[in-house]
Image: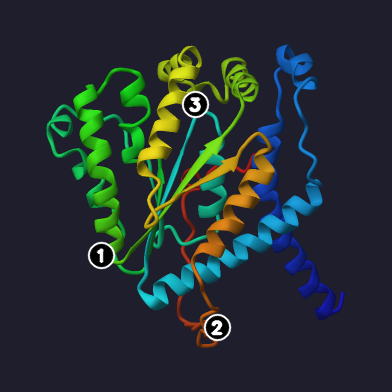
Amino acid sequence: MSSGTTEKSWIDTELEDDFDEELEQELDDGRLPAILREHHLNRTKSTIDRAFYFRELLRLQTELIKLQDWVVHKGLKVVVLFEGRDSAGKGGAIKRIAQRTNPRICRVVALPAPSSRETHQWYFQRYVPHLPAAGEIVLFDRSWYNRAGVERVMGFATEEQVEEFFRDVPEFERMLVRSGIIVIKYWFSITDEEQQARFLMRIHDPMKQWKLSPMDLQSRVRWEQYTKAKEDMFERTNIPEAPWYILEGNDKKRARLNCIAHLLSLIPYEEVSHEPVDLPERVFDPHYERRTLPPELYVPDRY
């Protein structure tokens, strides 16, 4: 076998690994318990070609790496909020954005329910420590807009607290922008029927049941209340400094591509030149003998 053939085979293997990582997630999305197969036939199918989706996703993820380098190079501070109904596809989009970026630069923040101490703090206080420093991108999987959505609808916040939030949040976000933080807000929108289908998937799929909480089930019951809360939120918090962007989420693949492409379009960036890297030669010590380690230290080679 020639050296050229060997090198090509090695490169092909690496590229296949890149595709496989996404394919594993894609196969997981497509797995259906038998009880849901008939129901699934009535759903609107994605019309985007799978091969095109994979190629475009990898192309956009390559651009995200360039954006990441630019953010570090220019010392930018970026906050991206992901909001939407339960099962709207926020997590899938965040996963694809963060999939190939540096986790020290592009961080995902998904805060749990507030502690008893946090409920008595200034409302925004628990979010402030997670805001980016220079050269960082922070992706909030749900954010301070919990107060305008789940907390309001489920009665975890009083109307006075909600009203105070609506008065404060525009000024809070303007303050962030004045401090040099780029604030981007996405709302993932899905239909009633699509949410029902995704919830059924979570109920009947043991590998996805962890995604379903009692709050999710209540969100089905209170669909119209969430709709009214969302409309009120848009009306009162869509400010020029930090506008809302709505993503149609029924087609997961299109939503992911549209989200990444739009995010890239909001922050002008250039490719950052890097110093060429040369792999140094390994140093060999002719007097060193590698010790034989006990076999019980090794993980069994089952595959």
Task: Tell me the mark number nearer the camera, choosing from 2 and 3.
Answer: 3
Please say if the residues under marks 2 and 1 sit with CB atoms less than 8 Å apart: no
Q: Secondary structure at mark 1?
A: loop
Of the two numbered discs 2 and 1 in the rendering, the one whose residue sits closer to the viewer: 1
* Above-or-below relation of 84 to 59: above
Q: Return the residue at label 1.
A: 179
Outermost residue, front side: 235
Secondary element at tag 2: loop
Q: Which residue is mark 3?
A: 211
* Camera-nearest residue between 245 and 299: 245
Q: As displayed, is residue 247 above or below residue 60?
A: above
As shown in the figure, which amino acid type bears the numbered disc 2?
Leu
> Which residue is pictured at 19% across the width and 26% down the height?
160
Q: Are marks 1 and 3 in contact (CB under 8 Å)?
A: no
Amino acid, disc 3: Lys
**Mark pair 2, 1: CA separation:** 41 Å
Which callout, 2 or 1, points at the residue further toward the start of the chain?
Answer: 1
Mark 3 residue element: helix
- Depth-wise, is mark 1 or mark 3 nearer the camera? 1
Name the residue located 16 percent from the left edge and 27 percent from the top edge: 116
Task: Name the quarter where the N terminus is drawn.
Answer: bottom right
Residue 242, how many percent across, how many down?
Answer: 39, 54
**Of residues 46 and 213, the one drawn nearer to the viewer in this rendering:** 46
Q: Residues within 10 Å of mark 3 (few under 14, many from 20)?
A: few
